Amino acid sequence: MFADDPKMFTCYADKDANEANRNLQSCSDKLAEYFDHWQLNLSFAKTKLLHLGKSNKRYVYHIGRDHPINSCENVRDLGVIIKTHRQGKEYYVWRGFPVEPSGILDPFLIDI
């Protein structure tokens, strides 16, 4: 991770979805306040939202009050592409090849 490459995520049970939504939005608000306080620029175009999980309610999150975070189907991070759907389940792409989380790359993959 680089200093200019923050990430936020949460895992939750279905019954806790609303609370998780509030907590993630609160974190986003605090991050926006931090950037404002230190007069740092945030690239809204590069900011992405990836929803994972079959029962994810696909909440919309904002940076501050005026900037909704764009939702996407995949994210590339340090050469690993994480996609939301492959026949109804999540999977990973590493260097262009689909990777199931049960091989040599397991230590580098996050269980979703």
Image (cartoon, helix red, strand yellow):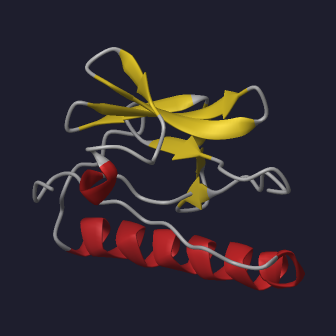
Quadrant for the C terminus, please: bottom right
Say left or right for 49 vs 38: right
- Count of numbered labels shown in the rendering: 0
Residue 97 lies, in percent from the top left, at 37, 17
Say left or right for 8 vs 59: left
Q: Is residue 41 above or below residue 17?
A: above
Which residue in the rendered view is the most extreme toward the top? 96
Which residue in the rendered view is the most extreme toward the left? 3
Of 54 and 57, nearer the camera is: 54
Say left or right for 3 vs 18: left
Quadrant for the N terminus, please: bottom left
- Quadrant housing residue 70: top right
Residue 2 lies, in percent from the top left, at 10, 54
Q: Is residue 53 above or below residue 29?
A: above
Q: Residue at x 61, y 29 (%)?
A: 73
Of 65 and 69, nearer the camera is: 69
Residue 45 lies, in percent from the top left, at 41, 30
Q: Residue at x 33, y 14 (%)?
A: 96
Q: Residue at x 82, y 78 (%)?
A: 18
Say left or right for 81 vs 78: right
